Structures are given as structure tokens and as C-alpha cells.
Image (cartoon, helix red, strand yellow):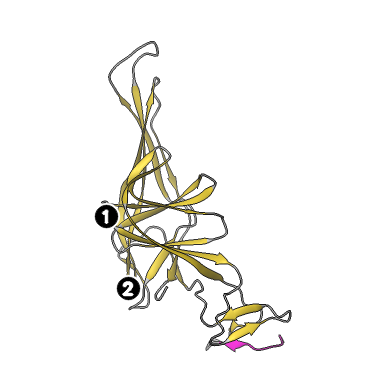
Amino acid sequence: MPTGFEVIGDDFNVVVNATWFNYELVDVQSQVSSFTSVGNFTFNGFVFETDDVTSLVFIKCESEFSIWSAGWRNGKRITAVATGITGIPIKMYLFKPQAPTASRSGIQLFNEFGALVFDGLSKFARIAGSMPAEGSGKYSLTSSREYAVMAPCFFGTVMTSTREGTGGGTGGSRWTIVTTLSGPKYQCQSDGIRYLGSRVYAVSEEPSWTQVGSSSYNYQGQNLVVADVKGY
């Protein structure tokens, strides 16, 4: 049997002990959507940049939005949020795996080496559930809370087509390669996450002197993780 102080839940599982580990809130950013871009893709929304791959990035938006993990830019991991129109408030909550900040107030737990492992006032990632990326209706949770979502990887459809343009030259006819990103829409509510169908949310257009065949690929991705961020 483990030694030291432990907190046991109603289900007799250990809630907190000296081996406690979690992700702590290190940053909250409030932004407003505008016309922006990632690479050649343009859309209404905002692009958040974080400095590593081990952090948890949760997005809260009370209007319709799509979320996509968009790779790297300028050495930063980027998470893009696409909204239907500009001027929509968006919040990003960033959690990192690190020791809690000592508040010197409330309960604190230390391990056998004297390191602080739990502080009662620390703002840890409160995971509320894991929801399918696609669905209908609402992913219901406890009411009177505030929820944010995290997309571990890209989920949606990438479709490429070629549009014939005007002009010519030594290379022949001018073409435009059009690539669209589409995927589910969500809305963060006080009692869960609402599904709002699917839409095209980002478009890329590139000139070409050659015609490219059309293609469509659907990325299944993974479930979205939902966090309770009330009070954060």
C-alpha cells in the first residue's frame, strides 16, 4: 500500500497523492477573429502560436467555429480557429506539464523529495470529456460551466480542383489550383459543446501553367478533448 497522504474519491480511486501529475494553466489569450491566413490558406479567424508540442491548447468560442491543428510556423506550433465572420471573440487556454505554483494557501502536497506536487489554488486542466469530432445535437456536460475544446490533430476534408483562367504565354494556358479545407463546426455552451454541421472554412488559390487533376481526401483525426475552464 502506498505511503503518505491520499485523497480517495467516492469510487475508491485515488484522486490526489504524492505521485499527482497534471497540466497547469500558464496562459489565457483573448482575441477577435479577422481575415487571416496560414500558408496559402485564407479564412476568417485567428491563429494561435505555442512554443512546444507537449502543451495542451484549448479553444473557447461561443459562436460557430472550426478548429484545426495546422502544423508549424516560424518555429511555433500553430492552432487555427476559423469563424463564420470576423469580429468573433475567441479564447485560448494553454496548459503545460509542470510543477504547480506554490500559493501558500490551502492544501499542499509534497513528495518524498520535498518537491511540491499539488497546490489547492493551482489551475490544472480539468478534463470534462472526450467527444467525437463529428456528430449532431449536443455533447452534453454538467450545466452552468464554461467549456473549451482541443483538437489533437487535423480532422476534415482537403479537396483540390483546377479552374481554367485567362491569359497565356510561353507556358501555355493559365490555371488556378483551388484547395479547400472543410470540417465540423462547433459552439461552446454552458452545458456542453453544440454540433453545427460542416462547412468549407479555408481556401487556397495558387497559379499554375499546368492542369492538375481533382482530388479529395478525408482525414479521420481523433476525438476532441473538452476541458472545464470556469474560473480560469
Q: Main secondary structure of the magenta part?
A: loop
What is the x, y in percent for residue 26?
51, 66
- Is 171 placed left or right of 97 in the picture? left
The image shows residue 74 at horizontal and vertical percentages of 51, 44
- Quickly name the residue at label 1: 87
**Measuring 39% from the left and 54% from the top, which residue is drawn there?**
67
The answer to whether residue 149 is left or right of residue 199 is right
Find the residue positioned furthest to the front: 104
Report the span colored magenta. 1-8
Amino acid found under the numbered disc labelled 1: Gly
Give the residue at mark 2: 190
Q: Which structural element holds mark 1?
A: loop
Q: Is residue 208 above or below residue 183?
A: above
Q: Which mark is residue 54?
A: none
At label 2, which amino acid type do we have? Ser
Could you tell me which residue is drawn at 49 percent across and 53 percent down? 153
